[in-house]
Amino acid sequence: MNPQKLDDKYDLAQATSYLAVAVNSGLSALAAMELYVRVSNGNTAKHFERLLKALQLGGNVFEEFETLRRKSKNEVFNQLLVKIEVSLQLGTPLADQLEQLAESILATIWQEQLTIASKRENLMLMPLVFLILPASVLVTLYPSMQYLQLIN
């Protein structure tokens, strides 16, 4: 797993959690994005900043969301955009959806880190098997071999 990819997922989870808290406290989705852009400097904040600048220049919200979805290769980021867009169109509660998405992203990150850790665990056993275990066997057997040679 690419560490940069994991960082991007963590940044997205952090952004989603931040947006959920901001929306839950009464801000609109776009105001929450604007607040997040001010306090963060990750990839997600850069995407949101481009979106907000396009909207300030008079772009249509839904067209800009579509443009951003087409440009982005990140599937989870596209899910976030769809949830925000549907919330803006239909007026559905956004905070709960964002919290669930953040939990889902964090669970995915945890699973990937667990997979990485299990692979590294096997690598960490190599010095034990090939260095420490043979040395301890030699330390254990050497005095016995010396004693047996003294008796003969």
Image: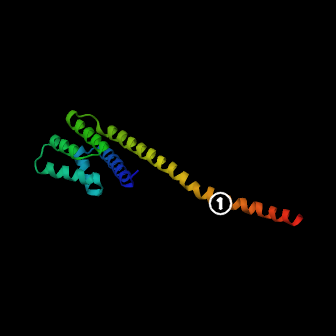
- Is residue 28 among what the camera can see? no
Where in the figure is residue 3, as x and y percent of width and height?
Answer: 39, 54
- Identify which amino acid the numbered label 1 is placed on: Ile
Rendered view: 17 above or below 40: above
Residue 72 position within the rendered picture, expressed as x and y whole percent measured from the top left: 24, 46
- Which residue is tagged 1? 132
Residue drawn at 84 percent across, 65 percent down: 149
Give the image location of residue 19, x and y in percent: 30, 46
Residue that sits furthest to the right in the current view: 151
Residue nearest the viewer, comparing 117 with 92: 117
Give the quadrant of the C terminus.
bottom right
The residue shown at (55%, 51%) is 122
Q: Quadrant of residue 39?
A: bottom left
The quarter of the picture where residue 151 lies is: bottom right
Query: As drawn, is 128 to the left or to the right of 114?
Result: right
Q: Give the colour scheme of this rendering.
A: rainbow
Residue at 56% of width from left, 56% of height from top? 124
Q: Left of 73 or right of it: where is 13?
A: right
Residue 95 appears in the figure: yes
Going by the image, does 140 lie left or right of 64? right
Q: Residues within 10 Å of mark 1 (few under 14, many from 20)?
A: few
Residue in front for this viewpoint, 5 or 138: 138
Q: Secondary structure at mark 1?
A: helix
* Outermost residue to the left: 58
Residue 103 horizontal/vertical position (percent): 39, 42
